[in-house]
């Protein structure tokens, strides 16, 4: 009998698609709802790629469009425009009914409210997707399902109805059900929303284990403790994705400010060793490193003393913008080309003014860097 | 409009499908009761009224030929109001463009425009036929398939034919009104009799009594007196029939049938009530959240209660708008159908006030009663419970967080599944969902099962009753086992007829029978009723009686007879061995009843005595008028052919043949009459089945609506359209099959009850109940089809649900 969860090796064999490394690709996905008040654009041309084996958190406020985004990925809703390719299938080029079968085979969904069928036992709930997609021999399905329940610690409860077990156990059953067809992609919508912290942690442990085995997990969550455990966080605000560099560089900003920066920031690429900021040069922008790394050099003389090595997700130029004056150090690209986001001074100062937490955090960074600058200048 | 009344209005018009379901649920009950109550009122009034309007004879005397002098003396007899003489004789006829003979009774009377008894209602053409002209009763027109103006070919006693035109059509609601088996009638003037080689004499008296026209005893006394006087004058009277003026002879039969219909109507109201209760329950469940919101903003229980009561009354009012006019039309249609079948007239279309009142009461009160409990519960719901999202999930149970105990039923279900799987029987989960879903809303399931089971049990019972009636008719056929009945107008030597008949290939045996007319007397010597004594050879294999008590006739019996059970109505204590006073050929005699047998009560009282003795009484040794012939082939077509052959054969040899007909002819006519009745019952059964399937459709619709979320989940984990549909349809079929099982059980008492009522109404005697697989198989097929049809729409809408809608629902 084949194990209920395939190994990364078997997984890779299965991924025979044109974009074999990509699990999910959204291309300019637009979703517009119409009602009596007029048209309302919920998703505004999203582009998103999620690779196999990633553990991704999608974060957003209520009404931001994160559920709609999840619905696009799971094939639950239709985009008004654009294309959604999941595991090599353009999922909106097939019928609703075909999509159900596709979904059963390709992705497991874990809902916030578990959504187990109340009339079936836990074991039967886990076997149900196998019946729907006709996976395994009919007689062997109970054994496969039992293994999955055992994996989530529910072997003893297998013959109970959902109402007879705790909410945590119901959610664990939902995860077992999501794994029933050995789908490569697990999508979870607020999976810990109704769980206590201990059960939530156990669930994330299970997710970690699944990722280790090669599954791709996309999870919508509000819980910051969960985003810290994912390999990637995607923030959606007002129907648009926030640039992940902005999220990393200024994580404490409000989503609308992040979105403004995403929209207004200018992209630039700098060649290896090229100077980005010269010492004493006036600084009019905040720089955020998207790819590559930069070296911050001491301004005095030719010794070129290295003050700091900044990597992707870090920012520079904030000292000059916050304190005024010219660059106290010079910044050069590292040994590889560097992609940067450049955000204008006036907008940055306004946003910082509206976001005291970020101002405070940045203030601390500025202090630390100035202190380091002072020490290294003396040395 | 105040916002809350606006809400009531919007609730009515916004969800049109739901409103339609509730309104139709109410309308079907209101319609059914309207049809039945209306038809009941129309028929019970019009049947007798239209019968009385035609001045029916209270006394009919079938007697030997007589002239105007005798008629005048009858008219002058005490107690007689009006009396008319007619000559009635059977004759074979066919339309000019056809060669198929039909036997009709021709009635010759003197003066059509001035006749006062058994009036004929003109329908078309000239209804006062001149010499060599014929007027036909509307049934005869239909049976012969001719129209006014067509020519008819009559076969005369000497074998020659006469062609005469049909000059008019009439309706005759009185002649033969009490006889299911009466042949079609034609009418001629007395002057035409000679063209049929008939004497210009009467053979029947149709008379009304001067007083007590609705007093059976008074009528019977006058009839007995008249008959006595006639017999004393040397005019033998073969048969005396009496009836009341204001009571159709079939009134008791029809009333019994209408009684059954009324019971069915009440049942349908009950069924539709459960349908309404189900629908309103579901509606209130959907509205609990709104009720919570209304309470949250200050709505009081009473206000909410009144709002929903108003909504229910509005549903009832809409249903009345549909059902009252349709019910009125249906009532008249049903009454017209029965009137046509039983040959009486209606007094015209009208709205029956009592039916209208019943409809309005049912249309308003039944939904109120059915909805009262759900509305009261709904209006009392707490805000917390109403606005929490757990109502749908909890399925009516109180919700609290954390694990709960599985109910006994839930444990039983899972244990059964486990036990089966341990024995290697694994039920696929989609089927398991259907099976377990069936029992989730047990209150709703019970109401649905109630409607379907009742519909099914009645449907099956109707088929059983049909077979019971036909079986009985078949048993009655044991009295008519001859393949051909060959009757002559005068006695012939039995041996001669036998010798001649046996020369025809296919004829196996010939028996000569005789008959004798007698009167049953009271102790004081007055006549109770006439009695036809049939006299076959005592050992005749052509009569196989259904004996209730005593024995059958034997060759040595003298003044002994076996009598039909219907005699018990006149002699309630009669038993085998008793003596019965009879008047035979004017002489009072004591005859011993040796046995009592079952027969169709409608046919009057019948007795059998051995030919060996009756031929002595009639002084017709070795002669017979009636011949019963057995042939090698016993099917109807062969019998018809042989009857035709014998008819030609004996006519050609100069014998006076009265008629030659297939042995099955009378039985087939009786069967057809019964089929009309059965069809009628079947319509009612189908109506109950319709209510049942509407109930099932409603239940499935509500189930799907409540399980929208679950259907979304199934879709989310890989269920394709067809599987979703299968799951819903399978649930409908499970409900259908359970109801079938229950209907089988219930069909037994229903069959016995219905058979008892119908047989008493039709045969005036309880008969042996017979069961048939047909009804069960047809209902099984029908219930499966109905279940699928009732589930298809909900299943389709379930399959069309997108998960986004499901999430929106959530």
Image (tube, rainbow, N blue to C red):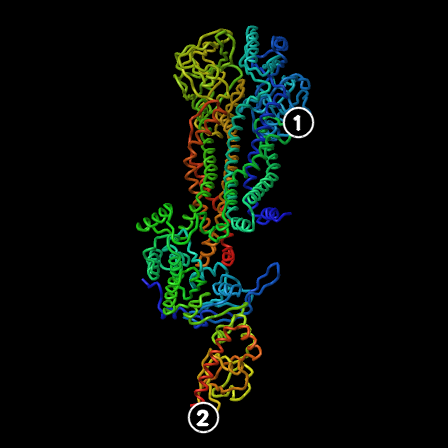
Left-right relation of B428 to B657: left
Residue A241, image x, y percentages: 52, 70
Left-right relation of B9 to B631: right
Residue for badge 1: B123
Considering the numbered disc 2 on the image, is that residue within a helix, a strand or a loop? loop
The residue most toward the bottom is A302
Q: In the depicted view, which residue is nearer to us: A298 or B227?
A: A298
Q: How many marks?
A: 2
Residue for badge 2: A303
Residue B726, image x, y percentages: 45, 51
Q: CA distance from mark 1 to mark 2?
A: 131 Å
How crowded pointer 2 is (Cα within 10 Å; few <14, some 14-19, many 20+) is rated as few
Where, by quadrant of the figure, is residue B148 drawn?
top right
Q: Is any atom of residue B161 visible in this view?
A: no
Q: Is any atom of residue A338 visible in this view?
A: yes
Q: Chain of mark 1?
A: B
The answer to whether the residues at label 1 and label 2 have Cβ atoms under 8 Å apart is: no
Where, by quadrant of the figure, is residue B32 drawn?
top right
Q: Is residue A269 above or below residue B537?
A: below
Q: In the depicted view, which residue is nearer to us: B49 or A233?
A: A233
What residue is at 54 percent from the left and 88 percent from the top? A281
């Amino acid at each position: 009998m084949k194990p209920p969860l395939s190994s990364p090796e078997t997984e890779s064999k299965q991924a025979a698609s044109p974009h074999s490394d990509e699990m999910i690709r959204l291309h300019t996905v637009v979703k517009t709802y119409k009602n009596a008040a007029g048209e309302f654009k919920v998703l505004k041309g999203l582009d998103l790629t999620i690779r196999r084996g990633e553990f991704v958190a999608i974060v957003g406020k209520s009404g931001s469009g994160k559920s709609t985004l999840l619905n696009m990925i799971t094939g639950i809703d239709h985009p008004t425009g654009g294309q959604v390719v999941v595991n090599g299938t353009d999922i909106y080029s097939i019928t609703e009914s075909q999509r159900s079968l596709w979904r059963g085979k390709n992705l497991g969904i874990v809902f916030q409210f578990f959504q187990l069928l109340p009339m079936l036992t836990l074991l039967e709930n886990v076997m149900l997707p196998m019946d729907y997609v006709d996976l395994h021999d009919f007689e062997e399905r109970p054994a496969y399902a039992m293994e999955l329940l055992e994996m989530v610690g529910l072997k003893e409860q297998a013959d109970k109805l959902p109402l007879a077990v705790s909410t945590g156990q119901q959610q664990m059953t939902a995860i077992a059900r999501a794994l029933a067809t050995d789908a490569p992609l697990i999508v979870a919508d607020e999976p810990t929303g109704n769980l206590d912290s201990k059960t939530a942690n156990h669930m994330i442990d299970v997710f970690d284990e699944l990722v280790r085995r090669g599954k791709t997990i996309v999870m919508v969550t509000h819980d910051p403790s969960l985003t810290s455990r994912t390999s990637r966080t995607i923030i959606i605000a007002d129907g648009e994705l926030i640039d992940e560099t902005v999220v990393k560089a200024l994580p404490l900003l409000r989503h609308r400010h992040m979105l403004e920066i995403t929209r207004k920031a200018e992209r630039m690429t700098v060649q290896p060793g090229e100077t980005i900021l010269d010492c004493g040069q006036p600084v009019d922008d905040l720089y955020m490193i998207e790819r590559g790394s930069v070296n911050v050099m001491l301004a005095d003389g030719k010794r070129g003393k290295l003050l700091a090595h900044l990597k992707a997700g870090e920012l520079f130029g904030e000292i000059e913008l916050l304190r005024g004056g010219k660059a106290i150090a010079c910044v050069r690209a590292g040994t590889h080309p560097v992609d940067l986001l450049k955000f204008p001074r006036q907008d940055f100062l306004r946003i910082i003014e509206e976001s005291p937490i970020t101002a405070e955090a940045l203030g601390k960074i500025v202090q630390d860097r100035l202190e380091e600058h002072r020490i290294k200048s003396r040395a | 409009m105040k916002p809350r009344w606006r809400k009531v209005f919007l609730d009515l018009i916004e969800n049109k499908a739901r409103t339609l379901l509730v309104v139709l649920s109410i309308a079907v009950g209101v319609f059914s009761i309207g049809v039945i109550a209306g038809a009941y009122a129309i028929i019970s009034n019009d049947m007798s009224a239209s019968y009385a309007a035609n001045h029916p004879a209270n006394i009919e005397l079938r007697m030997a030929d007589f002239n105007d002098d005798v008629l005048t003396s009858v008219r002058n007899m005490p107690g007689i109001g009006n009396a008319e003489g007619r000559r009635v004789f059977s004759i074979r006829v066919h339309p000019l463009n056809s060669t198929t003979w039909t036997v009709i009774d021709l009635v010759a009377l003197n003066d059509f425009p001035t006749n006062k008894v058994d009036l004929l209602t003109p329908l078309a053409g000239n209804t006062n036929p001149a010499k060599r002209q014929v007027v036909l009763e509307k049934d005869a027109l239909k049976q012969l398939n001719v129209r006014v103006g067509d020519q008819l070919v009559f076969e005369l006693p000497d074998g020659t034919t006469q062609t005469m035109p049909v000059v008019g059509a009439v309706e005759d609601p009185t002649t033969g009104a009490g006889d299911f088996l009466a042949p079609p009638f034609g009418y001629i003037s007395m002057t035409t009799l000679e063209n049929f080689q008939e004497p210009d004499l009467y053979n029947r008296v149709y008379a009304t009594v001067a007083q007590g026209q609705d007093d059976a005893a008074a009528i019977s006394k006058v009839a007995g007196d008249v008959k006595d006087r006639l017999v004393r004058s040397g005019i033998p009277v073969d048969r005396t029939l009496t009836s009341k003026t204001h009571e159709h002879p079939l009134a008791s039969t029809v009333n019994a049938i209408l009684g059954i219909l009324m019971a069915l109507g009440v049942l349908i109201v009950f069924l539709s009530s459960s349908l309404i209760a189900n629908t309103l329950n579901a509606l209130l469940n959907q509205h609990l959240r709104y009720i919570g919101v209304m309470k949250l903003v200050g709505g009081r229980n009473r206000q909410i209660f009144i709002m929903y009561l108003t909504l229910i009354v509005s549903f009832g009012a809409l249903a009345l708008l549909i059902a009252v006019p349709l019910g009125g039309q249906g009532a008249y249609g049903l009454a017209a159908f029965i009137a046509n079948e039983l040959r009486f007239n209606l007094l015209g279309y009208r709205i029956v006030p009592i039916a209208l009142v019943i409809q309005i009461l049912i249309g308003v009160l039944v939904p109120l009663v059915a909805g009262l409990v759900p509305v009261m519960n709904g209006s009392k719901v707490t805000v917390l419970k109403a606005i929490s999202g757990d109502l749908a999930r909890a399925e009516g149970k109180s919700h609290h967080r954390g694990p709960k105990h599985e109910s006994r039923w839930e444990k039983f279900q899972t244990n059964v599944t486990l036990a089966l799987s341990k024995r290697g029987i694994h039920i696929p989960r989609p089927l398991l969902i259907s099976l377990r879903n069936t029992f989730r809303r047990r209150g709703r399931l019970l109401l649905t099962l109630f409607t379907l089971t009742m519909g099914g049990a009645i449907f099956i019972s109707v088929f059983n009753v049909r077979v019971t009636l036909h079986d009985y008719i078949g048993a009655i056929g044991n009295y008519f086992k001859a393949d051909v009945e060959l009757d002559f107008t005068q006695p012939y030597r039995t041996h001669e007829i036998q010798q001649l008949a046996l020369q025809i290939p296919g004829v196996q045996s010939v028996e000569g029978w005789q008959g004798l007319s007698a009167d049953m007397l009271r102790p004081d010597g007055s006549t109770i009723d006439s009695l036809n004594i049939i006299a076959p050879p005592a050992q005749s294999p052509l009569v196989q009686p259904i004996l209730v008590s005593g024995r059958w006739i034997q060759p040595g019996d003298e003044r002994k007879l076996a009598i039909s059970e219907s005699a018990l109505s006149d002699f309630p204590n009669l038993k085998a061995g008793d003596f019965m006073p009879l008047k035979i050929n004017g002489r009072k005699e004591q005859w011993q009843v040796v046995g009592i047998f079952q027969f169709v009560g409608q046919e009057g009282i019948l007795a059998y005595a051995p030919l060996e003795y009756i031929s002595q009484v009639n002084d017709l040794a070795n002669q017979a008028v009636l011949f019963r012939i057995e042939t090698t082939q016993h099917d109807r077509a062969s019998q018809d052919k042989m009857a035709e052959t014998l008819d030609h054969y004996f006519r050609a040899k100069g014998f006076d043949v009265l008629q030659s007909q297939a042995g099955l002819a009378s039985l087939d006519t009786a069967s057809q009459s019964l089929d009309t009745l059965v069809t009628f019952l079947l319509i009612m059964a189908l109506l109950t089945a319709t209510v049942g399937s509407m109930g099932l459709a409603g239940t499935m619709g509500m189930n799907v609506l409540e399980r929208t979320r679950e259907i979304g989940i199934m879709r989310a984990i890989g269920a394709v359209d067809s599987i979703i549909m299968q799951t819903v349809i399978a649930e409908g079929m499970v409900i259908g099959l359970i109801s079938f099982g229950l209907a089988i059980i219930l069909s037994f008492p229903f069959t016995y009850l219905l058979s008892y009522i119908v047989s008493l109404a039709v045969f005036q005697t309880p008969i042996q109940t017979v069961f048939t697989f047909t009804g069960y198989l047809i209902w099984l097929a029908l219930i499966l089809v109905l279940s699928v049809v009732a589930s298809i729409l909900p299943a389709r809408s379930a399959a069309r649900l997108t998960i986004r809608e499901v999430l929106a629902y959530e």
